[in-house]
Amino acid sequence: MTHPDLQVSHGDLLHLSLFKSTNFDDVAEVLEQCSVLRVAAERIVIAAGQPNQRLYLVLDGELSVRLESPESPPVARIVKGEMFGELSVLDGGNTSAFVVAESDCRIVGLDGDNLWELFRRTPYVAHNLLTTMAMRIRNANLVMEDLQRQLAEAQQQS
């Protein structure tokens, strides 16, 4: 018998940005093939520079993104309904950051084949993923602009 915490319900999908505007029946069969994982607080889910074959969806809990090491200051938070790991799944490259559980979490791991199957079944999944990625790029651009401005000000003062 499968533990209820290790299954994805219709209610879980309502909170996942990847499945916004999708029909549960369109994605349920694929999600049944995916792993639901429980991750303890302070565990590293993804390590920078490593291969990764899964896009992760956060059902419960909070994680942080860290660039230099698992102990470095967080640069972003990932909360219930959000996703991570998509870059390495899509391009086959190594991961670009550490993702650390800030609390006990329940996450779904979608491998590349399952993700592509979801794209085939409903275009909303691809749309939602692209929208999330575009938003993250825009936010990164704002951070870069701020850093450039700070650097220019520091150079003027010296």
Image: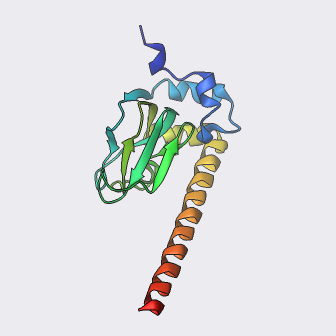
Give percent across and percent down for residue 33: 45, 26
Residue 30 rendering spot, x and y as whole percentages: 52, 29
Residue at the limit of the structure toward the front, as seen here: 157
Toward the viewer: 111 or 152? 152
Q: Is residue 3 left or right of residue 128?
A: left
Q: Residue at x 56, y 56 (%)?
A: 133
Residue sticking out furthest to the top: 1
Query: Which of the 4 image quadrants contains residue 20?
Result: top right
Marks counted in the figure total 0
Q: Is residue 88 visible?
A: no
Observer able to see residue 151: yes
Query: Is 14 located above or below residue 146 in the figure?
Result: above
Residue depicted at x 57% and y 63%: 139
Residue 21: x %, y % from top left: 71, 38
Residue under the point 58% across and 21% down: 9
Residue 137: quadrant of the picture: bottom right
